[in-house]
Amino acid sequence: MQKEPVLLFTRSAGSLHFPTGSLRKKFSQKGCEAGMWKIVTDALPQLIVAGLQYTIPIAIISFIFGLGLALLTALVRISRKKSIFFMVLKAFFRFYVWLFRSTPLLVQLFIVYFGLPYLKISGIAPDGIKLTPLVAGILTFSLNTGAYCSETMRAAILSIPKGQWEAAYSIGMTRTLALRRIILPQALRVSLPPLANSFISLVKDTSLAASITIVEMFEVSQQIAAQNFQPLVMYCLVAALYAVACTLLSWLQGYLEKITSRYVSNIN
Amino acid sequence: MLKLENLSKTFGEHRVLDGISTVFPEHETTVVLGPSGSGKSTLLRSLNLLERPEAGRYHFDDELFDFGKGLSNKEILSIRKRTEMVFQEYNLFPHLTVLKNIIEGPTQVLHEAKDTAQKRAQELLVKVGLGDKADAYPSQLSGGQAQRVAIARALAMQPKYILLDEPTSALDPELELEVLKVLRQLAQEKQTLIIVTHNMAFAREVAARVLFIENGQILFDGPKAEFFNTKKQRIVDFISAMTFENI
């Protein structure tokens, strides 16, 4: 069995590579003889490497950028500043959230990676905006998760009782200081479960990066399946790996919730 | 000295404050009485600018603030540093320990050194009878304890005026007593208090002055003794209703 996957950069669907008829039967039988265990142990290292090299870094980096963007968006949207500049800024961020929540992530990836090279702006990008697959992926994932997380954060900030603002104002705090010292720390606790949701979704959504030629975990599983003709085993295996990653994240979420909820009840 | 001239505030159609003019001298406890919805809470919150009256003038010592012209952020902050609010629902910061609740204002707003602030916070906690609660979180306190921490938090800012908005309305009588004892002590020490309350016994004991408000207007403004001996029928009725006397 071939160890190194053949890197395929242009394809539309994994099924394209499946052989048909007698050839498929022959390979399937061969697979059975080799044993399920061998198929799994052969593929596993490649999948894990792809996961560590692409899936996890893309998810983490995108989520960090996304969170920053989300916080900025949430703060602008709850801002009470009435200047023209802020009104325009608010409208812009509202448009951003609408745009990324109203269109499919896969389509967004295609627009950024395949579409933007055709966006020729004289002076700035006369030859179109050409991004490497990784940059296009991280950019799109960040923008997408940022849109969702901004709503989470906005809701969390708005959920903090008015009395907390008033108590902060009463001791002479400005709105900014009240936000930073009193409101955001409490909002963080409230927003943790939904933010963890977003991160877990993002980890799984990175599989869409396969469609813009990034050789992440799912892409590698497709390539291996195309060689060993074991799509069922390969896709179940990669599904299990996503499940393992997400389970670890759920545990992390539980741990973080425990830390940030220390003050809530008498449990100590 | 804090002086109000013709304070007016409307919520929609409803005129909550209707030309309030009065003086709150320093080192004296004023109790604000009146039926629910009379505007007494709004008046108190206006003193700390949590509510912004639409019209009227606000004198703080020699400074004059005109609500009709609007106040700058700087002016608002300068007033808030001199007036501290104590709320019915305590509004302690739940994510901070008791000690950190108290030093939050002094360190973040007044930029005091942390150890100075902590030392004074600890003294204030002893004063309100909670010297052993410095490291507790608000969720671990009873209502009476929480309200006393809130009073300590207000005192830590060394304000000229402490404004208390029904500070014991959420407490049962025993816990209420803990809080009232602290307030009585503060009044005796000549800390200026302005208290909105329904507790007539407390008003009778601690107040120097009484302000009676109804429909956004002042019906009575004068020394305590005068208030409890007034012949004004509305006030006589109010007092007897609140104290179960002559009913």
Image (cartoon, rainbow, N blue to C red):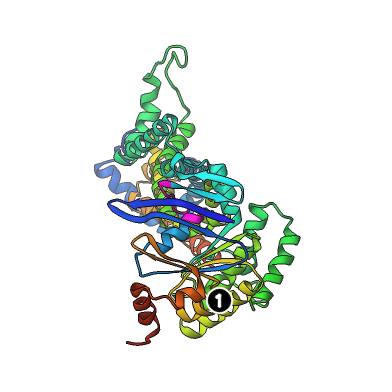
- Dot 1 crowding, Cα within 10 Å, few <14, some 14–19, many 20+: many
Residue A170, percent from left and from top: 54, 56
Q: Is residue B96 left or right of residue B45?
A: right
Residue A157, percent from left and from top: 44, 53
Q: Is residue B47 magenta?
A: yes
Which chain letter matches label 1? B
Q: Residue at x 36, y 39 (%)?
A: A97
Q: Is residue A42 magenta?
A: no
Q: Residue at x 66, y 57 (%)?
A: B106
Residue B13, percent from left and from top: 27, 52
Magenta-highlighted residues: B46-55
**Rendered image quadrant of residue A212:** top left
Q: Is residue B176 among what the camera can see?
A: yes
The amino acid type, in three-letter code, at marker 1 is: Val
Give whichever of A122, A7 is nearer the camera. A122
Give whichever of A185, A237 is nearer the camera. A185
Residue A96, percent from left and from top: 37, 36
Q: Is residue A22 left or right of residue A233?
A: left
Name the residue carrying label 1.
B206
**Rendered image quadrant of residue B112:** bottom right
In which quadrant is the C terminus of chain B drawn?
bottom left
Q: Is residue A246 among what the camera can see?
A: no
- Asked if B236 appears above or below B29 in the picture, the reply is below
In which quadrant is the N terminus of chain B drawn?
bottom right
Label 1: element kind: helix
Q: Residue at x 34, y 78 (%)?
A: B237
